[in-house]
Amino acid sequence: MFDKLTFKRRKAMDHAPDDAPLEEPISVEQASAQYAEKYDEQGFWAKCRRYAGAIGRSGLEKAFTLYYATEHKNCTLAHKTAIYGALGYLLTPIDAIPDLTPVLGYTDDIGLIGTALLAVNSCIDDGVKHQAKDRVGRLLGEGALDGIRHAQTEDLDAVVGTWLTAMVAAHSTITADHWALKVTPMRHALSADADIYVYEKFGQVVGFYALAEQKILGLCVLPEQQDQGIGAQLIAHLKAHHTPVTSELFQINEKGVEFMLRHGFKVAQEIQEAEYNQAKYVLTLAS
């Protein structure tokens, strides 16, 4: 799949100067085999932080677009090999250049990354692009963008708070005290097993979705932020990355049920929740 996509490879030198001659172009597939094993996630993050100015905004956005493309459901092993090869190539020469000046040594690296982006285009959507732009803004000290990103450990309190507020608002026949008793179990489930994505607005978490083993643990937006398209964006992101999935909603949460049905979920089963003495729908969303 990569035969016509090529880039130039540095000669095998431990400390090649920046103007060292380049070998003839080789295929992305060949280069991936050589450089993918050199990719290290911690090294990638550390060096992007350290050399953000030297790599530049455009180069960083391309690199992080590749990085987040690995999370897309379309990303195959061949795609990941191409991505890790390109990012491994980006990392390889940096330690050999003790005093980087802006854009020194990165022309070929960024060109390779652009080529790799073409090779894995099917793994790149608006969500991936947003995550990349958001991360670059943070690296460059510009703050976060509004939109969806992968949750960090420090987001857990905001996620749990959003869940509690949304649950109380959506279930008029279940007391707030009852939901408060569920905070600790929910926190444990989120921190132990869940893949969580948050919607951030003006630097604050206002919505999220979380799932474990293809089951949605929560998909919530703060009541005051509802009806602004945030939930629809969360659903679109979920569809792009994680289907098929299942979800359970109380029937009394009419607004939530209607929202899920409107966005493609189907009622697969009706069950009775003994603890709450409430009826539930089991909803499914196919790939």
Image (cartoon, rainbow, N blue to C red):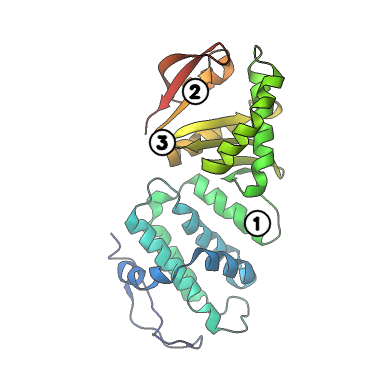
Q: Quadrant of the N terminus?
A: bottom left
Q: Residues within 10 Å of mark 2 (few under 14, many from 20)?
A: some
Where does label 1 land, which residue?
Answer: 137
Q: Which residue is mark 2?
A: 248
Q: Is 84 rendered above or below residue 227?
A: below
Q: Which residue is mark 3?
A: 243
Q: Nearer the viewer, residue 236 or 182?
A: 182
Earlier sequence position, callout 2 versus callout 3? 3
Question: Is 195 above or below relative to 218?
Answer: below
Which of the 4 image quadrants contains residue 114? bottom left
Q: Give the mark toward the camera: 2 or 1.
A: 2
**In the rendered structure, which amino acid carries the disc numbered 1?**
Gly
- Residue 92 in percent (x, y) is at 47, 76
x then y, percent, for residue 90 = 48, 71
- The residue located at (58%, 70%) in the rendering is 47
Q: Secondary structure at mark 3?
A: loop
For the C terminus, the image quarter is top left
Label 2 and label 3: CA atoms lie apart by 15 Å
